[in-house]
Amino acid sequence: MPKESHQSKLQKLIVVGDRLLIKPKSQREQTKSGLFLPPGVQEKEKVQEGYVMKAGPGYPIPADYGLDDEIWNQDEKEAVRYIPLQAKEGDLAIYLQRDAVEINYHGEKYFIVPQSAVLLLEREED
């Protein structure tokens, strides 16, 4: 069986709701004044930055049912609709660390962050 590339493994992931999968940006090990920081110091900062690898579909919109149209009486299932997220794959996101959940996926460190924790996005326009 051939080895899967890291990118194809990420394609299998489905991010749910208003969440983003963020790969942290490589941290500088040295301050502007020249001091070397031990590992983990910058991880404790309140604000972090990283690249959006995958984005969820957005905020679900509740179905609009009338008084006579009960959910259990519906013959056809309506497709779920979403309000899309502002963040897109490839954006640089600056987010609050306290709301992020750290995961390790195939040896790589990622964060799952709700869009409400994102403070700023930088997007490279074509």
Image (tube, grey):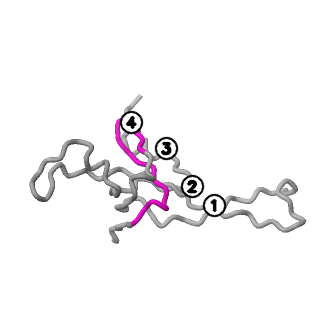
Mark 1 or mark 3, which is nearer the start of the sequence?
Answer: 3
Observer-side mark, 2 or 4, equals 2
Measured from the top left, where is residue 9 in percent x and y?
43, 41
- Does the magenta-highlighted stretch encompass residue 118? yes
Residue beneath the point at 55% across and 51% down: 16
Q: Which residue is mark 1?
A: 60
Q: Is residue 106 left or right of residue 39?
A: right
Q: Which residue is mark 4?
A: 106
Observer-side mark, 3 or 1, equals 1
Mark 1 or mark 2, which is nearer the start of the sequence?
Answer: 2
Q: Is residue 109 left or right of residue 60?
A: left
Amino acid type, residue under disc 1 in the picture: Pro
Front residue of this view, candidates 14 and 48: 48
Pointers 4 and 1 in contact (C-beta within 8 Å) = no
CA gap between label 2 and label 3 equals 16 Å
Secondary element under disc 3, as helix, strand or loop, is loop
CA gap between label 2 and label 4 equals 23 Å
Observer-side mark, 3 or 4, equals 4
The numbered disc on residue 12 is: 3
Q: Which residue is mark 2?
A: 17
- Does the magenta-highlighted stretch encompass residue 37? no
Secondary element under disc 1, as helix, strand or loop, is strand
Q: Residue furthest right?
A: 68
Quarter residue 77 falls in: bottom right
**Residue range of the region highlighted in magenta in the rendering:** 102-119
Front residue of this view, candidates 98 and 93: 98
Mark 1 or mark 4, which is nearer the start of the sequence?
Answer: 1
Secondary structure of the magenta portion, mostly? strand
Measured from the top left, where is residue 39 in percent x and y?
23, 42
Pointers 2 and 1 in contact (C-beta within 8 Å) = yes
Q: Is residue 20 left or right of residue 30?
A: right
Up-down relation of residue 38 to residue 48 (above or below): above
